[in-house]
Image (cartoon, coloured by chain):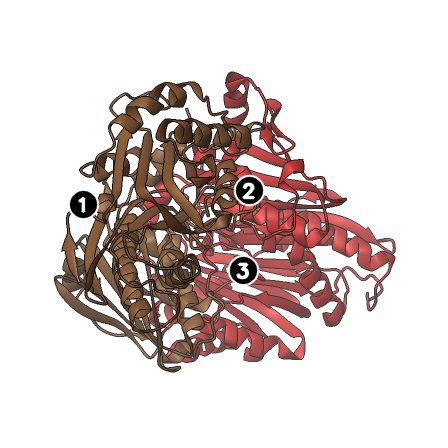
Chain colours: A brown, B red
Amino acid sequence: MNIIEGGVCAAKGFLANGIHCGIRKNKEKKDLALIYSKAKANAASVYTTNKVKGAPLTVTKNNISDGYAQAVICNSGNANTCNANGIEIAEKMCELLASELKIDKSDVVVASTGVIGQPLDITPIRDGIGALVNGLSSENSKLAAEGIMTTDTRLKELSLSFEIGGKECKIGGIAKGSGMIHPNMATMLVFITTDCNISTAMLQKALSTDIQNTFNMVSVDGDTSTNDMVTILANGMAGNEEITSEGEDFDKFMKALNTLTVYLCRKIAGDGEGATKLLECEVDGAKDEENAKIIAKSVICSSLVKSAMFGSDANWGRVLCAIGYSGAQVDVNKVFVSFKSEKGEISVCENGAGVDFSEEKAKEILLQDEITIKIVLGDGNARATAWGCDLTYDYVKINGDYRT
Amino acid sequence: MNIIEGGVCAAKGFLANGIHCGIRKNKEKKDLALIYSKAKANAASVYTTNKVKGAPLTVTKNNISDGYAQAVICNSGNANTCNANGIEIAEKMCELLASELKIDKSDVVVASTGVIGQPLDITPIRDGIGALVNGLSSENSKLAAEGIMTTDTRLKELSLSFEIGGKECKIGGIAKGSGMIHPNMATMLVFITTDCNISTAMLQKALSTDIQNTFNMVSVDGDTSTNDMVTILANGMAGNEEITSEGEDFDKFMKALNTLTVYLCRKIAGDGEGATKLLECEVDGAKDEENAKIIAKSVICSSLVKSAMFGSDANWGRVLCAIGYSGAQVDVNKVFVSFKSEKGEISVCENGAGVDFSEEKAKEILLQDEITIKIVLGDGNARATAWGCDLTYDYVKINGDYRT
């Protein structure tokens, strides 16, 4: 498996574009993104479990219920959620795009991200759709990645090549993260494209399995968004024999997908709203995977742990506290905790109690951009990893006045 | 029922004191508190559900297992949790106090609050115990209230008089809140005294029932502390006929207790770490009380709602979002939301969708110190209230460097 250029256009037959059409006031910010597959693609998707769902999710779910899609349109700046005419607007977006691309409107995946509860005006989208489609190119994945950003500070994109049955396959993805990020099915916007030939059923299976250990293990702020979805399009143009069941080929596909999604998870967590640091919580020695996950997520979600990490303070008592209230089955007297970064690793707690450690060394480790909180339990052999970020002044600043 | 002076010394036979003994470096801050009842009192307590429990909780639980206590000792500045010798130190605190007061060491309630995982030195406590006991007075409730404060900025104390069977009874309490506050059994330190004559069993019943709608409905930061407990001592000196079963007298006692605990909840929430505002979330029209509580707590815990309230931004979409991911059974298309303060009330969402409202008026309402987020559902008649606070720069500042 190799990292390659191209993002969502790396796979054969995919084009993309991103423009500023006028939904956002700031003309420097793109607000409309498009991904298009020359061939009709098998499509799979997962959605937020929030009961308040963005109208685009309902329309998308309906559109891909036949297993196919050919284009993804996504605007930023407005979530089109909690609006009386939300469904109508989301459908209109599909119609406008389908008419311009000359495809079936039921082959459009539609998504929106931004503020909730403000009507989304179709005018800028209608006016911009021509330019959006005209600019489609295999070079423009980065423009699409920009078009879906909200408070993200960095573009999130990766593509990989891998081989199945002697054929080179490619997979790529773009993601939007930042705020309202909390594990519950899918918790962000992610669009993935691949030319691998894989049935809709196996594509859905791959995605639904993968997110359990990837996107579901990311939390920025504990708020599960109303508009999250992860969608994958597979157009089969790599020419491999169609993957229709589990086996070696499916495993290879899963591995490529997982490499991509773990990368995007880390990027989303590290670029959480206001974040200065990526936090990774590795739990090992758990009774079972479920308990390992509960603990990893509890630690990564703790406001007190997050604040301590912002201050590069080795306050491991808060890690123990978060393990204790996680609800997991755990023997707290057998817990080991260490902090790790590229500057080394330091043990701070053994068998549930503090150990002497160099505060100076701990500070040096915790001043880095990527911190691993390593927890070893004495309950079994299961493990899990969760990703998050520190809690900073800027998170409060960004969210104290996001809407106005 | 009347509000009276005296705090935990309002009830007959109770004395208190608080001193600086040297656990905390800052000599301006008291760090050791004592409450003493002249007569042996019936005692009831609830404790944190965190699996990582402070050593003092284990010792207290054991001490009051016979239903009696006569004194409460509590230090701040160190939680005596996750220490290898924690139990030994907590027991030593009881012994030192019992010896000075000439009471049985198993009649001491012991508590600690502060940083987790640093050994608690018994020396300053041993050295200070004489002065602590010598200063006992019915005038010193406020000193005890100060002695249990950590990052609290305001002392929390109230006392009430009420009447049972022609006898005047009194009840009073002090509380410590601020950080690591999240609903799960008891989520702070609260010590309550009363001279009402009530059996241990009914006292425990009253407390365990009351906290379901009071202390369990408070959240500052979603972190459930390791050291939380609410303890009540009833010494019977009011001379009313002992309450040994449910009935009119028990109801009167419950009402007085509830008035006290709701007051303390609001004080704890409003003085949450870094908070500038008390947030109250009132839910009505829920299917049942359980669902009303889930929704009220979800809204009060949302970092995004809390940040918006800090910015006085009427971002009601985040309220809808938090209702949606709460896990409660709710028809999101029937949700009404309004914001309320002493400056008035403004409706922002009806039937799950936004309504036109004056941003200016909303701002005026949200700039106040006490904000009510009012949610009316269309699912039934059940209601619940939760208390929290806004998320501010200062929360991050306080917790980015708490330990060092």
Residue B304 pos. (x, y %): 44, 40
Instruction: Please tell me how many numbered marks the rendered image carries.
Output: 3
- Chain assignment, label 1: A
Q: Quadrant of the N terminus of chain B?
A: top right
The answer to whether residue A287 is left or right of residue B314 is left
Residue that appears at 15% across and 47% down: A5
Q: Nearer the viewer, mark 3 or mark 1?
A: 1
Q: Pointer 1: what residue?
A: A6
Location of residue A339 (image quadrant): bottom left
Identify the subunit bearing mark 2: A
Which disc number belongs to residue A381?
Answer: none
Question: Which of the labelled discs sits on residue A52, or is there none?
Answer: 2
Q: Mark 1 vs mark 2: which is more N-terminal?
A: 1
Label pair 3/2, CB-CB below 8 angstroms: no
Point 27% across, 21% down: residue: A27
Residue named by callout 3: B136
In this picture, residue B1 sits left or right of residue A110? right
Between B385 and A210, the one nearer to me in the picture? A210
Circle 3: residue type = Leu
**Residue positioned 32% across, 35% down in the render:** A34
* Residue B391 shows in the view: yes
- Residue A93: x %, y % from top left: 44, 29
Q: Of residues A249 and B382, which is closer to you in this image?
A: A249
